[in-house]
């Protein structure tokens, strides 16, 4: 027993621990229920009575020393653990956090708006929830026009003498501009529009438009044609050609739909332009005199043109993404494709 005490004493001298876990293991090893020192106390019962005094003292000394050593180790190890954390290399580069990027529809809308701003147009915005006057009546829609039907338009309040509805085009903002400003007027109106359509690859109940309006003295169809040609060249490249096909809108007369030469096959015919060499991009026309008068502009003094295009449609042509639904589902794999399309 004397030897064991001696051995444990010298062993305790040399014990080193790096972690609090190790200190605890050491405590269990010596002082735990089955620990080395605890076992010696059990053995002590068998010691001859005349030796008890000496061994008793030695054993108690051993126990106290072990307890003191454990306390001391616990102290130094926890200080070391505390100071270990800041010992990281503070000059290491940090974790980069993911930057968002602009949505493809926002990129194209901004591109369209920037082109017209360069031509001297202002930007006007208006409410998405509108009344009949700004979406239809002031734009020369006859009372029985099918666009006023619930099948085509989302109504917010039904059966009301002046029902609220979700605007079906941003021409409503052009009306608001004409009501509040005197010519010369040059504005583009970007915004979300809503139509009661079944969602498919080619149609959606929500989409974005940029419409434009130019009113001044002596504005002619030639000015409209030139504005559209300049826009098309800025947007699709300097070799782009345009063609105008006669069309009909209640708010313009004459009216036209505009195609641009297909920038993929350069007019030879491919599956994007369905072999025609042309892609439809917008509707336009000379503002109907009734529309000018409805907003208090003298149609004998002033004339103007208007145009409107779908942002998703232009984005589809630009990136050849032929399913409109991709633009609304916010699938990160799709959105990431555009994260380098512009600097954020
Ligand atoms: N407002 C029309 C639409 O939503 C587009 C358009 C605007 C056509 C201006 C001609 C002139 O389809």
Image (cartoon, rainbow, N blue to C red):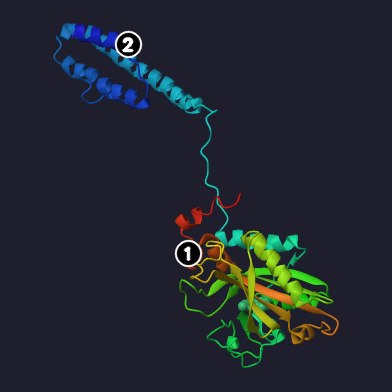
Label 2 CB sits under 8 Å from any ligand 1 atom: no
Choose between 15 and 55: the one closer to the eye: 15
Q: Residue at x 68, y 63 (%)?
A: 113
Q: Is residue 253 visible?
A: yes
Residues packed near mark 1 inside 10 Å, few (<14), some (14 to 19) or many (20 plus)? few
Q: Which residue is mark 2?
A: 14
Is residue 189 placed above or below 41 in the rendered structure?
A: below
Front residue of 129 and 12: 129
> Residue 326 — which label?
1
131 is higher (above) or lower (below) than 52: below
Percent of width and height locating residue 211? 67, 72
* Spatial CA span between label 1 and label 2: 70 Å
- Please tell me in which quarter of the rendered image ligand 1 is found: bottom right
Residue 170 location, quadrant: bottom right
First reached walking from the N terminus: tag 1 or tag 2: 2
What is the x, y in percent for residue 149?
Answer: 57, 88
Image x and y of residue 29, in percent: 25, 22
């Amino acid at each position: 027993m004397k030897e064991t005490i001696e051995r444990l004493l010298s062993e305790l001298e040399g014990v080193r621990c790096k972690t609090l876990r190790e200190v605890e293991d050491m405590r269990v090893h010596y002082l735990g229920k089955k620990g080395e020192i605890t076992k010696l106390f059990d053995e002590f019962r068998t010691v001859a009575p005349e030796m008890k005094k000496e061994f008793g003292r030695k054993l108690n000394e051993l126990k106290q020393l072990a307890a003191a050593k454990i306390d001391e180790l616990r102290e130094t190890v926890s200080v070391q653990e505390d100071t270990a954390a800041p010992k990281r290399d503070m000059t290491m580069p940090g974790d980069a956090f993911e930057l968002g990027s602009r949505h493809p529809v926002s990129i194209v809308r901004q591109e369209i708006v920037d082109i017209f701003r360069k031509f001297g147009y202002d930007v006007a915005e208006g409410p998405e929830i509108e009344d009949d006057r700004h979406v239809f009546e002031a734009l020369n829609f006859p009372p029985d026009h099918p666009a006023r039907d619930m099948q085509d338009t989302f109504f917010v309040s039904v059966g009301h003498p002046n029902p609220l509805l979700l605007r079906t085009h941003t021409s409503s903002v052009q009306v608001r501009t004409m009501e509040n400003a005197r010519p010369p007027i040059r504005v583009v109106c970007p915004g979300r529009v809503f139509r009661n359509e079944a969602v498919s690859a080619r149609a959606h109940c929500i989409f974005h438009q940029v419409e434009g309006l130019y009113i001044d003295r002596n504005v002619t169809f030639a000015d409209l044609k030139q504005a559209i040609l300049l826009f098309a060249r800025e947007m699709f490249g300097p070799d782009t050609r345009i063609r105008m096909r006669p069309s009909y809108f209640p708010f313009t007369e004459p009216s036209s739909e505009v195609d641009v030469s297909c920038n993929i096959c350069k007019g030879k015919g491919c599956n994007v332009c369905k072999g025609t060499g042309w892609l439809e991009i917008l509707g336009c026309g000379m503002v109907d005199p009734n529309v000018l008068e409805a907003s208090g502009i003298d149609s004998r003094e002033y004339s103007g043109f208007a145009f409107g295009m779908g942002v998703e449609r232009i984005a589809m042509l630009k990136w050849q993404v032929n399913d409109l639904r991709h633009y609304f589902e916010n699938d990160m794999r799709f959105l990431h494709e555009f994260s380098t399309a512009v600097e954020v």
